[in-house]
Amino acid sequence: MKIVCIGRNYLAHVKELDNDLPTEPLFFMKPEMALLTAGKPFIYPDFSKEIHYETELVLRICKTARSIAEECAADYYDAITVGIDFTARDLQRECKAKGHPWEKAKAFDDSAPMGEFKKISALKCPDDIAFGMKLNGKWVQQGHSRDMIFSFNRIVAHVSRFVTLEAGDCIFTGTPQGVGEVHVGDTLELFLEDEPMFSFCVK
Ligand code: MG
């Protein structure tokens, strides 16, 4: 299983980090060791002083394929959940400035907590999926899939041109605005269509 992540997929978030607008989906990957099972605590790593949460919709691929046509891409994912793309923002800034790869800022162990998957067909509003996160009981991020710059289908088609997607692979589809730091003692609560999916703490 691999974890593919899309960066800069919501306009307001691109602006809050002062990044350029992408002309095609920008992707990177996290290894399987990045997966943090829903509910387990996130242990604040010693290599960063600025870990940010990024709350994202996560797609699950259901059929193995490469070079998927955008028009049929919806046949290749069937389930969705919410997750956090934890980012060591201090290390990421350093990598960007030096033109280095992002892995140490993005792909570290436990950097991808995610909930149980739900069938997309069972959602109330599959064409505009609401999601969000409460930090210590207060809403800090609320997003809608209609605000994505690149659609799920476009993302799946684009990534599969370069990397074969296999059943069980997960795709983080980008964060809306409102990213920020976590601290030891924080509790994060994730929602999909107003339903609480899972919560966990930072230790
Ligand atoms: Mg992200």
Image (cartoon, rainbow, N blue to C red):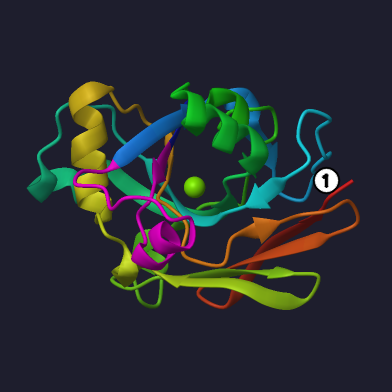
Whole-percent x, y for residue 55 in the image: 56, 58
Instruction: Kindly identify the amino acid type of the residue bearing the numbered disc 1.
Output: Pro
Residue depicted at 74% across the width and 61% down the height: 188
Q: Please, what secondary structure does the residue beneath circle 1 have?
A: loop
Whole-percent x, y for residue 141 in the image: 58, 70
Front residue of 24 and 172: 24
Residue depicted at 32% across the width and 69% down the height: 147
The answer to whether 161 is drawn above or below residue 133 in the figure is above
Q: Which residues are magenta?
A: 5-25
Front residue of 83 and 88: 88
**Label 1 belongs to which residue?**
41
104 left or right, relative to 71: right
Front residue of 69 and 76: 69
Snapshot quadrant of residue 150: bottom left
The answer to whether 92 is drawn above or below residue 184 in the figure is above
Could you classify mark 1 by the number of other residues whose Cα lies within 10 Å: few (under 14), some (14-19), or many (20 or more)? some
Front residue of 183 and 93: 93
Snapshot quadrant of residue 24: top left
* Residue 133 part of the magenta-drawn span: no
80 left or right, relative to 116: left
On the question of residue 41 being in view, the answer is: yes
The answer to whether 193 is drawn above or below residue 24 in the figure is below
